[in-house]
Image: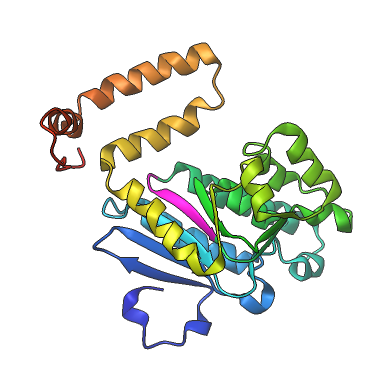
Amino acid sequence: MTNSDVALNMDDFLVIRKDDRKSGVVTLTLNRPKQFNALSVELLSALQAELDSIAQDDNIRVVVIAANGKAFCAGHNLKEMRAHSDEAFQRALFQQCSHMMLTINRMPQVVIAKVQGIVTAAGCQLVAACDLAVAADKAKFATSGINVGLFCSTPAVAVSRNLPRKQAFEMLITGEFIDAHTALQYGLINRVAPAGQLEQVLQSLITAITVKSPVAIRIGKDMFYKQLNMSIEDAYHYASEVMTCNMMADDVSEGIDAFIEKRQAVWKGC
């Protein structure tokens, strides 16, 4: 949904999109509060469509993924999964979800999860897949599939790349909830705030990003994820090449001159 659709009933939309063109920030709000924003096939498709569209827009700098209701995201829709017990459906669902998570990593914009409530199973995967995350202090997190006999294998991919090994495995193997401050300590989220201050904390983080060079943000995000799976030798070689190319950008010349001249840089985004 876009701003031109404001006359329509918000409840009709699985994902509500709000664009702030001045700041270059788009907020995507999961809008199935009665279903605890579970990642049904339809919700995944709606979110994928928005992310694909945003990824092509150079004017967008930051994407916020938020949610309506008591839960941020309760993971996959278990009722839908039970209604389609054939193997082909299950495989397609997990592949669809994995593709959406990878889209978040690969798109040039910085993606921030704004967590206001409970997060379980693939909901934790979504938080972990986002580049950054802020959470209300009352938020709780669990990879709870194990409680119904289903190890959270796909959430484990993202969670284990955020948390230390033993903390990640404890979450996955026990299904127990951790609170927001523990999630911060473990590295699943970046900042915690009282619910009434969550938006303020989010905006502070957004500002810290959007005042930086757009070209540096784009190059940096792409480089960060690519080097993670390289050997240290390959990572340094790749990073050196990226940094060399980055140095050729107009924004770097402007940024260094502004630093030397003690003034604000005027970014061109190239």
Q: Quadrant of residue 230?
A: top right
The residue at the far top in this view is 233
Type of secondary structure dominating the magenta stretch: strand
User: Residue 75 in the image: x percent, y percent?
Assistant: 69, 60
Question: Is residue 95 visible in the rendered structure shown here?
Answer: no
Is 254 part of what is drawn in magenta? no
User: Residue 98 in the image: x percent, y percent?
Assistant: 61, 48
Q: Quadrant of residue 30?
A: bottom right
Quadrant of the drawing holding the C terminus: top left
Which residue occupies the foreground of this view, 147 or 192? 192
Question: Is residue 134 visible in the rendered structure shown here?
Answer: yes
Q: Is residue 257 above or below residue 155?
A: above
Which residue occupies the foreground of this view, 3 or 167? 167
User: Residue 199 in the image: x percent, y percent?
Assistant: 45, 64
Is 111 part of what is drawn in magenta? yes
User: Residue 61 in the image: x percent, y percent?
Assistant: 32, 51
Q: Is residue 213 above or below residue 5?
A: above
Q: Residue at x 58, y 66 (%)?
A: 116
Q: Is residue 104 above or below residue 48?
A: above
Q: Residue at x 53, y 49 (%)?
A: 130
Which residue occupies the foreground of this view, 188 or 263? 263
Q: Is residue 94 left or right of residue 19?
A: right
The residue at the far left in this view is 261
Q: Look at the image and give the residue range highlighted in magenta.
A: 108-114
